[in-house]
Image (tube, helix red, strand yellow):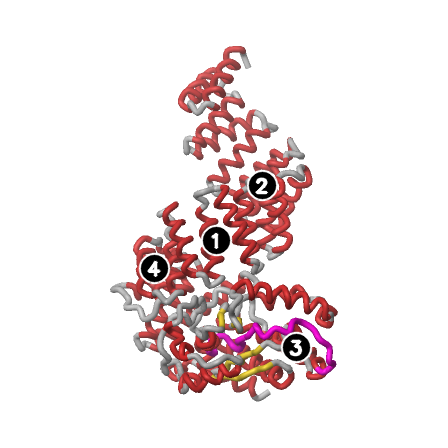
Amino acid sequence: MDVTSNERLKAGIRHHQAGRLAQAGQKYNEILQRRPNDANALHLSGVLAGQQGNTDAAIDLIRRAIGVNPKFAEAYRNLGSVLTQKGRFNEAGAAYQKVLEVLPTDCSAHRKLGAAFAANEHFQNAVSAFSKAIEINPSFAEAHHDLGTILAIFNRLDDAIAAHSKAIALKPGFAEAHYSLGNLLSRKGRAGEALAACRRATQLRANFADAYVSIGAIFLHEHRAIDAVEQFRKVFEIDSGQLKILNHIGTALVAQGKFEEAAGYFRRFLEQCPESEFGYGYRNLVSTGRVAAAAGDCQRLAAVLHDLNSPADNRIAAGFALGKLFDDAGRFDDAFSCYSDANALGKQSRAAAGDVYQPDSVQSTVNHLIAVFERGRFGNGRNSGASSELPVFIVGMPRSGTTLIHQIVASHPQAHGIGERTDISEIAMDLNDSELWDDANALSAAAMRHLQRLEAMRTDAARIIDKTPSNVYWLGLIALLFPNARVICCRRDARDTCLSCYFQWFSLGNTFSFDLAHCGFEYLEIERLMNHWIRTLPLKMIEVQYETLVADLEGQSRRLIEFLGLPWDPACVQFHRAQTTVLTSSVWQVRQPIYQSSVGRWRHYQRHLGSLIEALGRTASR
C-alpha cells in the first residue's frame, strides 16, 4: 500500500471508530478508486455496509477482500457475523472455521462457531465448540454460559447449572447468566434460589424483560398468581410490543378465576397476533369458559388447523380450540373431527422429538413396581423417612377428578394446595440407585428436604395437598418417605376419563393422550397399579369415585375431610369461591358450582370410540 493510501486507511479507521460512518466510507472509497483490490479497504467497506444495514453488500465486499487475501482471519470473522445476521448459519459456521484454520487458539472464534452450530440445532457440535473455547481460556465467562444453555437442551440440568454458576463466579455482573441460572433452578423445583437469581438479573439490568417474565412464571408455579400478574405487567411497561406477555397476564388471571378480565387480555393478543400464533392465542381464550366465537373465528381456526405451512403447535392449538367451540355448541361430530386432527398432529410432533408412548414399557414399569413393593417390604419394622402427617397426595389417571378434589380439600382453612409438582419424581431420580431405596438415612434426608420445601410454602397448614396424578407411580417410595402421609385415590368412568384426556392438550408428558387406544391402556395400567397399592401399602388411603362425588358433594366432602383428620368446614363445598390459584386444565370447571354434564359425556361421542372401547375390553380381559 502506498503512503497516501495508508494515510487514507488510517483516517478512515479513525472516522469509523468515532462513529463518523459517512466520512469513513468516503476514505475507503478513495482507496478503492485507486486500488480496487485493496483487501483492507474492501473488508472495512463491508463492515461499514453491514453496520448501515446493507448486509448483501457487506457479504459481497468482505468476500472480495478474502478473495484477495485468503488468510484474512478478521475478514472471515466479520463475514461470519453478517451471515449470522442473515440467518445463514451454515455459511457463518464455515467462515468461523476459516478463522480457526488461521488462528486455531482463537477462543472467540470457537465460541462463535458454537453459536452457529446451536442456531442450526447441531447441539452436540455446539457443545464441542464451546468446550474448546473454555479449554483455551478457562476464564471465558460467556463460553461457560453458552455451554450451560446447550447442556440444558440435553436435559443435563446439574451440569448446566454448574456452567452458569461458573460464568457468574468469573463475571459476577453477568445478568444473562443469572437469568439463565434462575430458569434452570426453577426447572429443578428450587423456587427460592430461582427467584433470587432472576431478581439479581433485574438488579444488574433494570429493563431485563425476560427476567421479569421468568419471575412471574416462578410465582405462578408457586401459586402466587397475584404476584405473577404484577411481574408480567412490568414487562408490558418495559416493552409494550411484547404481545406474548398479554397471554402470560391472561393465564395468571385465569388461575385466579378472573375469567372475564383474562379473556380481555387474550382478545387483545388475538387482535394483534400474526396468523402463526392465532391458534395458540385462541386456545387460551377458550380456557376462560364458554366462549361465543366471533364471526369467522371457526373458519379461521379451521384454516390454521389445515395450514401445512403453519407451525405445528399453532395448528394443534387451533384444533383443540375449535373442538372445544364445537363441543360447547353441541356439534359433537365436528368437535371429534377437530380433536382427532389435533391429536394426530400432536402425536406426530411428539414423535419427531423422540417422545413416543410405549405401552410395553408402561406395563413393564407397573410389573416392576408391583414386584418390588410387595407387602413383605413394609413388614420388617424398619423406620425410614419422616413421621410428619403434613403431606397429602391426590393420585389417579389425569382428568379423573384430581383437580376437583384438590380444590375441595384445599378450601379448608387448615389445608393448603400446591397443585401439581415434580418434587416426588425428582426425589425418585435422585434415589435411582436401588440400594438407596433401602438406605434409611438417604430416605430420611430426602424426606426432610421435601418437608422443608413444603413448610416454606405454608407453615401454618396442617395438611399440604399435592395433586400430581402421576405420583401414583411413586406411592411405594412415598410410603418409605412419609409413612404417615395420606393418599386420595381418584377414580372415574373409564370412557369419560379417557375421552377427557383425548380432548385435552397436555403441554408436557401424558403422551398416551394423543391416541384413544393408548388412553385406554394407560387407564387400566394405572388402575392395576392403584389396586396393588391399596392392597399392599401401609399408608392411610381413601378411594373417591368422581360420579359419587358429583352426586353427593357434601357427603363425600365430609368423608374426605374426616379422612384428613380435620374438623368439618362449610368452605369445602363452596370450593368454587376459594381464593386459590388453579393451574390445571380443569381451571374453569372447578371455578363453577358442581355440575352433572361431565358425567356420561362419552355418550355424545360413542360412535367414534371404537378403538377406546376395544382397548379397554381387550386389556381388561387379559
Left or right: where 480 falls relative to 187: right
Residue 443 placement (x, y as % from top left): 68, 69
Q: Is residue 398 magenta?
A: yes
Marks 1/2 in contact by CB < 8 Å: the verdict is: no
Number of the label disc, if any, that sits on residue 266: 4
To which residue does mark 3 refer?
369
**Disc 3 to disc 4, how far (Cα)?**
44 Å
Q: Under tag 2, what secondary structure?
A: loop
Where 230 falls versus 15 (above or below)? below
Three-letter code, disc 4: Phe
- The stretch in magenta equals 379-401
Which is the main secondary structure of the residues drawn in magenta? loop
Whether residue 166 is visible to the viewer of this picture, yes or no, is yes
Q: Callout 3, which amino acid?
A: Leu
Looking at the rendered image, the quarter that the N terminus falls into is top right
Q: Which residue is mark 2?
A: 172
- Please identify the residue farthest to the bottom as the structure is shown: 621
Mark 1 Cα shell of 10 Å, populated few (<14), some (14-19), many (≥20): many
Q: Amino acid at mark 1?
A: Ser
